[in-house]
């Protein structure tokens, strides 16, 4: 593996004041999720260690953990590779996410709490700015925050952790879809519909809009499979 300049700069410096292992794992994981490390790309423990300024042992441990997450494939005698995007795993993650988040948003709507609405509206404002500026990374970060707010506002942080644990493959599809013309605006409008339903206290409508929003990935997969079949499995 020879990391490009873009890939190298995506690997953040390790803070020696903080535990090393979680930083290395999180760093490489994020580079896989945002596709700066591409599906099926070969990975070198030595090169990653040099880029991160650490020894090879914690890098090896991070890669093993990422293999358990389904984001890295380790083949004895052949090498280590970023896992392809496995459609079956994307669909399973979508199923789990929809089952949980539809229930979460119903609880939020039933509360109809102005303080929660205020936080969601602030998130929407940041999403709008990112969409208007074509800021893909900024929009993705605020998209994550929007869904996190929903879970944490009804004390379902464990549900959010479950979602985070299963949606690695799903996140890569989301990243690939963001540059599509009009897609950021479409996602923003879907979020707006969810918030409007929450503010009206209508759990049934909130659930409907959340399900529609999360099912967007089906259309995205069909499009990406036609355009970039080589990164899928």
Image (spheres, rainbow, N blue to C red):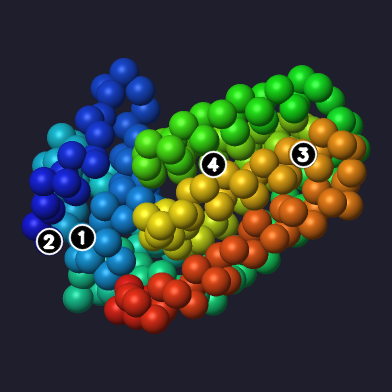
Residues marked 4 and 2 touching at CB (< 8 Å): no
Quick one: SS at disc 2?
loop
Sequence order check: which comes first, mark 3 or mark 4? 4
Q: Nearer the viewer, residue 130 or 60?
A: 130
Rendered image: mark on residue 1:
2
Q: Could you tell me residue 177's position as x and y percent?
A: 43, 60
Residues marked 3 and 4 touching at CB (< 8 Å): no
Residues marked 4 and 1 touching at CB (< 8 Å): no
Rendered image: mark on residue 196:
3
**Residue ID for mark 4:** 143
**Residue ID for mark 1:** 43
Sequence order check: which comes first, mark 3 or mark 2? 2
Q: Residue at x 15, y 35 (%)?
A: 53
Mark 3 vs mark 2: in front = 3
Mark 4 vs mark 1: in front = 4
Give the CA separation, mark 3 to mark 4: 17 Å
């Amino acid at each position: 593996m020879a990391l490009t300049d873009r890939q190298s700069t995506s690997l953040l410096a390790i803070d020696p004041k903080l535990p090393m292992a979680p930083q290395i794992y999180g760093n490489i994981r994020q580079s896989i999720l945002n596709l700066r490390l591409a599906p099926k790309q070969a990975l070198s423990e030595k090169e990653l260690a040099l880029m991160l300024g650490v020894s090879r042992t914690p890098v090896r441990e991070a890669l093993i953990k990422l293999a358990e997450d389904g984001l890295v494939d380790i083949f004895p005698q052949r090498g280590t590779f970023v896992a392809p995007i496995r459609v079956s795993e994307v669909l399973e993650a979508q199923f789990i996410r929809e089952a949980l988040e539809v229930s979460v948003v119903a609880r939020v709507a039933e509360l109809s709490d102005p303080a929660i609405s205020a936080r969601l509206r602030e998130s929407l404002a940041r999403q709008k700015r990112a969409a208007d500026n074509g800021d893909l990374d900024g929009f993705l970060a605020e998209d994550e925050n929007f869904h996190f707010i929903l879970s944490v506002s009804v004390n379902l942080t464990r549900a959010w952790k479950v979602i985070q644990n299963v949606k690695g493959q799903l996140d890569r599809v989301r990243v690939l879809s963001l540059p599509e013309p009009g897609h950021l605006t479409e996602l923003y409008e879907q979020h707006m519909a969810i918030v409007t339903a929450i503010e009206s206290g209508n759990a049934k409508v909130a659930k409907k809009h959340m399900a529609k929003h999360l099912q967007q990935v089906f259309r995205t997969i069909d499009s990406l499979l036609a355009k970039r079949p080589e990164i899928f499995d």
